[in-house]
Structures are given as structure tokens and as C-alpha cells.
Amino acid sequence: MAILTSVYPSGTRVRVTQQTPLRAETWTNEVEGVIQRSRQAKTGSWFAHAKDDQLWLDRLEIRLDDGEIAVLNLDQYSVVEVIQP
């Protein structure tokens, strides 16, 4: 995967849509806010033959309009849209 810091710089306003596919339906969640940080971070889960023997995830930290910080794990079901000011 591409390094996220070059794709989504801090201060960018985005809308992130994430989907969870189920057998008969799909759950969809949408979050909008300003990027605080984007990075690849390892989890506490062990994963063989990956860097440092850990599973690495693309993470996006955004500040929502009410001030809450949301940490999103991005996957193949995530869509990030840049919102123009």
C-alpha cells in the first residue's frame, strides 16, 4: 500500500466511507472531519513474515466537527474523499 502521509496531508478535510460486507447486506458508515495524522501502524496482533512480525494497518486520525478524534483503519472497503473548503 502507498504511504498515506504523502496522499493525505494533515489539515485536509475528508469524508471517509467504510463498508462492512455481510452475507445478505452491507453496513455503511460515513465520517467527516479534518485529518490530524495518517500513517501505517502495527497492531498488537502477530502476523507471520511481515515487518517486525506484526500486522501493519493504514490508519487515519481525523478530528470530527464536535472535536472528537476518530481513528480509522483503512481497508479495501474504505473510500476517502477530499472535501474542498
Image (cartoon, rainbow, N blue to C red):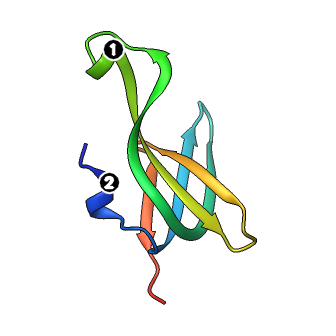
Residue 4 image offset from top left, x and y in percent: 32, 54
Q: Which residue is mark 1?
A: 53
Q: Nearer the viewer, residue 26 or 14?
A: 14
Q: Is residue 36 left or right of residue 22?
A: left
Mark 1 packing: few (<14 Cα in 10 Å), some, or many (20+)? few
Mark 2 packing: few (<14 Cα in 10 Å), some, or many (20+)? some
What numbered label is drawn on residue 4? 2
Q: Nearer the viewer, residue 83 or 7?
A: 7
| Residue 50 falls in image quadrant | top left
Residue 48 image offset from top left, x and y in percent: 32, 9
Residue 19 vertical placement versus 47 (above, below): below
Which residue is rendered at x = 46% and y = 51% of the image?
78
Report the quarter where the N terminus lies. Answer: top left
Residue 42 image offset from top left, x and y in percent: 42, 29
In what element is the residue under mark 1? helix
The amino acid on which the numbered mark 1 sits, given as a three-letter code, is Asp
Residue 68 vertical placement versus 84 (above, below): above
User: Which residue, as the protein is rendered here, is positioned at the far top?
Assistant: 48
| Mark earlier in primary sequence (2, 1) | 2
Which residue is rendered at x = 25% and y = 12% of the image?
49
